[in-house]
Structures are given as C-alpha cells and as structure tokens.
Amino acid sequence: MKTEMHTIGHRARYRQFMSSTTKLAITALLVGLAIHDAQADKKTVCGITVNSSDELQTFRRSLPADKFQFVELVEHGRPDWLASACKQGIRCDVLVISGHYDGRNEFYSQQVTVEEYLPIDEMERVSCSASCPGLFSQLKEVYLFGCNTLNPETAHSSSSEIRRNLTSASYSAAGAEQMSHAAGERHAESNRDRMRSIFKGVPVIYGFSAKAPVGPTAASMLYRHFQADGIGDVGTGRVSSKLLARFSANGMTVASGMTDADPRAVERRQFCQFSDDRLSTAQKLDFVHQILNRNMADVRMFLDRIEKYTASLSDAQRQVADVAAALSLIAGDQAARSRYLDFVRSADPPAIRARFIKLAGSLGWLTPAEQRAEMMRMIGDLLAKDLASPADAELVCSLNDDRALDAELAHLPLAEAQIARPVQAVMLACLGSAEGHARMLSAATSANPADVKLAQLYFRHRPISVNEELRALTVGVTRMRSSEAQVVALETLALHNLTDPDSLDALANLFAGTDSASVQAAVAGVLIRSDYSGIDSPQLAQLLRQSRLRVSGGELIDVLIRRLERRS
C-alpha cells in the first residue's frame, strides 16, 4: 500500500508538469497515427508501454520482420513522447498497451522510476473529437494487457442509492423506483463498455475480464502461441480463437469497438458532449444545463462528468462572454436549483452529498458562505448519528483540510453524548476543537487498537506541530503494552519527521527491548523517516543488528542499517 501511495503521489507531480501538453500531445499523436503510407507493405505494430515491455518485445521477436514493423511510442523520461511519436508520421495497424489499469482513470506503472501513464479521459476525448481516425476507427486490433480492461460487470451501480435518496426527497416510492431503474439501465457502464466506446469501430479488442497475467508470464504465453503458428491472425482484424484458448485460464476475452447502431451509442454521444473538442465551452455548459433540468436520477448519473468538467474551467475561461452567459443562465435557474438542493439535503452516502454541495458552489447556486453552511448541516447530521463510522470521520477531516470550516464549529449545537463518542471526537478535532485534539493525543496510545486507528486518521490530516506534544506522544508509545496497538501508534509517529534525539533514543531502546518483530519493523519505519543526523549512526546501526529478531519481513530494517552505515 505504501508503494502504491508513493507511486500515486509521484504520478500526481508528473501530471502537473504534463497538464499543459497532454491534450495537444495526444491529439497530435493520434492524428499522426491516421497518416497512411500507401506504398508501405508492412503492418505497423505500435506499443504504448507504461509498465512491462515484455508483451511488445514478444510480438517483435515472433512476427516476421518482412511483414511487420514495430514502434514504441513512449520515450521514457520525455513528457511529450506522444507528440514526438506523431512527428514521425506513424501509422498503426495494431496497438499493444501494457500497464496496470486502475479500472477507471488510467493505465500506469507501479515502478516509481516510471513517470509515464496513459489517461483514459484523454483517450475518450480524442475518440469523441474524431481527431484520430487512425487509432480509433482504422486500427485492426488492440491488445490491452491490464487487469479488468474488458470486465463486463458494471463498476458502480447507483440505482439503489438514487431510489433511496429520491424517496427521502419526497418522491413517491413508485416514481423513485421508475426513475432510478431507468437511469441505472441507461448509464450502467463497465470497463468493457468504456473500451468499446473509446476504440469505436475497431474490429478486435483483446483484454481481460479479471486479473491479467504479469508481463513476463503474458510474454511467455504469447511466445508459445506465436510459435504454434499463431501469427496468421495478427493484424487482420479477425478474432484468434487460438489466442483466446491460450489465455483462457487468465480470463482473456474479446470485444469489438462500438458502432453507431449499438444500443449504447446514444449514451456515448451524450458522454461525448463533455469531451468533444469540436464543441465550445459554452455549448458544453448548455448541455450541462439541459441535464440539470432533467430528473435528479439523471443528474446523479452524470455527477462525475459534470463536476469534473466544471472543475476544469479556469477563472479566465469563466470570464469569456459566452461562457459567463451560459454560467449565468445556470445560476439563475431557480427551479433547477430548488429541485437540486432538495435532493442534496437528503442525499446519502455523505460523500456523495458533499460532492453535490461543492458542485452547487461551482454552478453558482451557493455562495461560499452558503456552501459552508450546507457542509456544516451535513456534518451536524453525521455528528448526530448513533453509528457514525471512521469513513464519516475521514470525510469530515478531508472536507476541512484547508481549515475553512474551523470558524463554523462554534455554531454547531452539540449534545454531551455526541462529544463523548470516539468517532465524533475525531470529527470535532478535525473541525478545530481543542478538546477533540487532546482526546486524539490520548487515544493515540490507547490499549484499544480501534481508538489508536482513529487517532491515526486524525493525525494524517492534522500532523502534530508542537514539539512537546510530539515528544510526549513518543514516550507514551514506547510504554504501550499491546503490540498490535503499538504498531499502529508507531505508524502514526512515522507520519512525523522526528528530530528530537531523546525521542529517537527512546525508540531505539524500544527496538532493543521488544519481543515483537512487527514492533521492530514499525520502529524502523519511524526512524527511516526521521532526522537522525544528531545521533550516533554507527552505534544505532550496531544496536539494530544485534537486537533484531530473525524473522522474515525485516527488509525495512536492512534498508535503515545500510543508510546508517553510509553516514558513518
């Protein structure tokens, strides 16, 4: 999980650098892919490798050089690799994409040294804009080497949620059932649906309905397939039953790109309203306005796309005359606003309600003060819940990461029973309550692992900034008796960059004195993230070597020892 979070953070920084070039680069590449060389006899196999190169290399090794040529479109370390590939006038007959697929947003690599990724939204944008007929309508085959790329199951169904919320918003039970069912049927979208939509008109799309084999395994299976005379169908646009049989145990499946006659073509045209570059911003906002005047079941189904699109509008874009006029029409639509807010105030789960509230602010239906008031109304409802969950507390803390709601805490009517509940204490602490903060400091060294985890949740959002508190917490952690709770408490300490030599000495003594390998590993996790420049590195390294418990899973301890030895 830590590796995954590091990778996600690494990619996020890379996105900031790429954001100004990604759209132009992908458009340029895909236009380049459409360029045909009428004299060329060879078929071109293109690769987009953001994780394992094993699959593409197997194609290269197995297919005859007099019939196929190969192009890797990714130039690692170069953010404009797509534009660079386009300038070469590449035409693709076959496309091989290798990368982990997160099931929603992108193909990516788990290798922290790899920064390239392939955003699904951008692929959808180019497909909807018809800016690359070469890739999306003239390709013969696409190979998607990523998990669940062609999973036919709907990723998220909101029908029951919509039905419940419509009923709470005073819709009749029959009406709520009808609207939620109809919206769910129209908008249900699986990974398979999305890939068929992106690769519109492509005859053959190979992918996986579940977990895909890792790169070396997939390459080995491909090689055996090609060696068994399996090259005849490559680049023809014909489905290879032999390839499907070879990967049958791994859930390989096949689909064809969507056509205009497909039952989901109408929904594709609607989704394309958000990403088609041929439409102006004002035209896209007019379509948003149309949706907002539909029933709330439809609005809910389009929530992801509406909020993503409105969030993408810069302040400068919002000032353009026709855009400002379109936004003004939405903001002034009192009937749509009233219907929307009635639905929002009864919406559940709370995370969806919060998203609706933020979107209302973006649409001009709530002033900043009104938006804060709506958020506090929702938080008040959470504080009143008898069975509030850690997920509820996480939501409240994330909503107030900028501390904009701290000033609203004084206006919350709170009963004594609410304040006493552990989960509610986390919420109050994240809203700036001094009493809640003190309770979290105490909970962080509790013998109850559940309380320690709640404290950890809080300190992820509000790291300790007072040295005396951090020092006292460290001492308290070293005195804990439950190893399970102590490990969680140490993970909480690891969120902070410890610099106090006395605290680091206390942790070293804990390492030497514990009989728990998990506690030792957790101590190493704290120390490796700390500033230990003020302590005796050779002495600490020797203590770690002599005191470590010889069990598996001590890799982090090894890394720490090596770092200490390099400092000596």
Image (cartoon, helix red, strand yellow):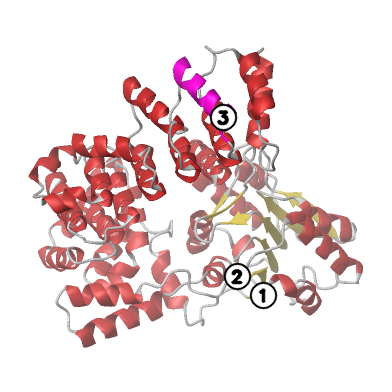
Q: What residue did someone put label 2 on?
A: 150
Front-lying residue, 55 or 260: 55
- Residue 423 at x, y percent in the picture: 28, 51
Residue type at mark 3 is Gly
Above or below 521: residue 51? below
Residue at 64% across, 65% down: 211
Q: What residue did someone put label 3 on?
A: 513
- Residue 251 at x, y percent in the picture: 68, 72
Q: Are marks 1 and 2 in contact (CB under 8 Å)?
A: yes
Q: CA distance from mark 3 to mark 1?
A: 58 Å
Q: Which residues are magenta?
A: 501-514
Query: Is 276 a magenta residue?
Result: no
Above or below 346: residue 164? below
Along the horizontal axis of the image, is 264 left or right of 54?
left
- Residue 527 at x, y percent in the picture: 54, 26
Q: CA distance from mark 3 to mark 2?
A: 52 Å
Q: What residue did someone put label 1 on?
A: 254
